[in-house]
């Protein structure tokens, strides 16, 4: 009898493991799908710039106009290269290798991918990037987290608005904080505890840009941040907006005390119900 029960438990455990594996796969595909949608539009935008300035250069043969056209085409080409590099990096990078990373550069590169989208939805970016230590992270994964937070923030402001992105050095804890703060709808307190659950969404489906509506974004964010021994915290006020804070270990902290822990602590995401600043 007991044997049968434990066999049954083992079988259930196996099913859970396999479902978890499928969930990770679904999260990865969702993120990649959204990234492809974003980058294809951005890439198209770059191509339009190249084509239009090439046409202009062919029409106007004077040197100053041609110089200007070459300059625009050159810049657009560089932007296109950054866009394809990000996509290739994310599609390729399955291994979770972490290294000292300049978060300012990482944020800027991520924003390149969203330039057109943020313009289209009339989102103004407010960046505050003081000098902070390097963080010990997997750049592609943090970029994925950032993309989801930025797109969620954009979706919380359907009529446009301000989106603040901040870097901060938490000297006490040896962490670098990356804050994404929107001035959008906010999240009702009763819904806040559920936002990190897989498949929890309040969106009826993907929006006009093909994003969101799966409820997989924040659960993926949390998994990634926990794998980095970091924390993800949220503060929100209905009608005022939401701030997500990623706390990531600095490179010095991470390399100094990376001693194996027997049972890794599973930090509960910081559900702080106090108002956003
Ligand atoms: N910045 C935000 N402002 C308001 N609500 C948010 C914000 N970010 C997340 N949410 C809420 O959390 C839910 C889950 O987010 P997420 O896991 O990214 O899934 P999805 O974007 O597919 O809905 C969203 O449906 C939304 O209700
Ligand atoms: Mg989302």
Image: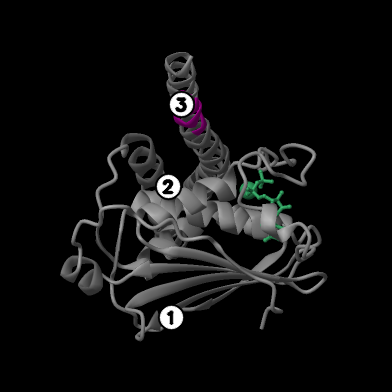
Indicate the secondary structure of the residue bearing disc 1.
strand
Indicate the secondary structure of the residue bearing disc 3.
helix
In the rendered view, how is the structure colored? Answer: one colour
Q: Give the side of residue 120 with respect to residue 43, left or right.
A: right
Residue 91 appears in the rendering = yes
Mark 3 or 1: the one toward you: 3
Q: What is the span of residues highlighted in magenta in the rendered image?
A: 16-23
Asked if residue 143 is among those painted magenta in the image, a careful observer would answer no
Spatial separation of the CA atoms under disc 3 and disc 2: 41 Å
Indicate the secondary structure of the residue bearing disc 2.
helix
- From the top left corner, tell me how far across and down residue 212 is, in percent: 67, 43
Q: Is residue 189 above or below residue 25?
A: below
Question: Farthest front residue?
Answer: 1
- From the top left corner, tell me how far across and down residue 174 is, in percent: 32, 78
Counting other residues with Cα less than 10 Å from the Cα at mark 3, is it few (<14), some (14-19), or many (20 or more)?
few
Q: Quadrant of the C terminus?
A: bottom right
Spatial separation of the CA atoms under disc 3 and disc 1: 41 Å
Residue 241 versus residue 201: which sits nearer the camera? 201
What main secondary structure does the magenta stretch of the protein show? Answer: helix
Residue drawn 46% across the image and 57% down it: 110
- Say which residue label 3 marks: 13
Residue drawn 66% across the image and 53% down it: 195
Of callouts 2 and 1, the N-terminal one: 2
Q: Is mark 2 within 8 Å of ligand 2?
A: no
**Residue 199's quadrant in the figure?**
top right
Q: Do residues under tags 2 and 1 come within 8 Å of each other at their CB atoms?
A: no
Residue 83 circle label: 2
Mark 3 or 2: the one toward you: 3
- Say which residue label 1 marks: 168
């Amino acid at each position: 009898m007991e044997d049968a029960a434990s066999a049954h438990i083992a079988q259930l455990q196996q099913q859970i493991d396999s479902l978890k594996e499928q969930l990770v796969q679904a999260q990865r595909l969702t993120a990649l799908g959204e990234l492809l949608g974003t980058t294809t539009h951005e890439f198209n935008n770059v191509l339009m710039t190249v084509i239009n300035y090439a046409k202009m250069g062919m029409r106007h043969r004077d040197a100053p106009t041609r110089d200007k056209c070459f300059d625009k085409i050159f810049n657009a080409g560089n932007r296109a290269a950054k866009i394809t590099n990000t996509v290739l990096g994310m599609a390729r990078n399955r291994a979770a290798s972490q290294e000292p990373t300049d978060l300012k550069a990482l944020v800027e590169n991520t924003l390149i991918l969203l330039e057109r989208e943020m313009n289209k939805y009339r989102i103004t970016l407010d960046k505050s990037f003081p000098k902070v230590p390097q963080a010990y992270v997997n750049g592609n994964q943090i970029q994925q987290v950032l993309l989801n937070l930025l797109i969620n923030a954009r979706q919380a402001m359907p009529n446009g608005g301000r989106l603040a992105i901040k870097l901060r050095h938490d000297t006490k804890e040896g962490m670098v904080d990356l804050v994404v703060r929107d001035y959008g709808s906010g999240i009702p307190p009763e819904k806040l505890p559920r936002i990190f659950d897989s498949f929890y969404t309040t969106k009826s489906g993907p929006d006009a840009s093909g994003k969101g509506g799966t409820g997989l974004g924040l659960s993926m964010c949390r998994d990634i941040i926990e794998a980095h021994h970091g924390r993800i915290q949220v503060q929100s006020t209905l009608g005022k907006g939401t701030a997500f804070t990623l706390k990531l270990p600095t490179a010095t902290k991470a390399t100094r005390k990376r001693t194996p822990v027997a049972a890794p602590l599973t930090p509960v995401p910081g559900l702080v119900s106090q108002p956003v600043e």
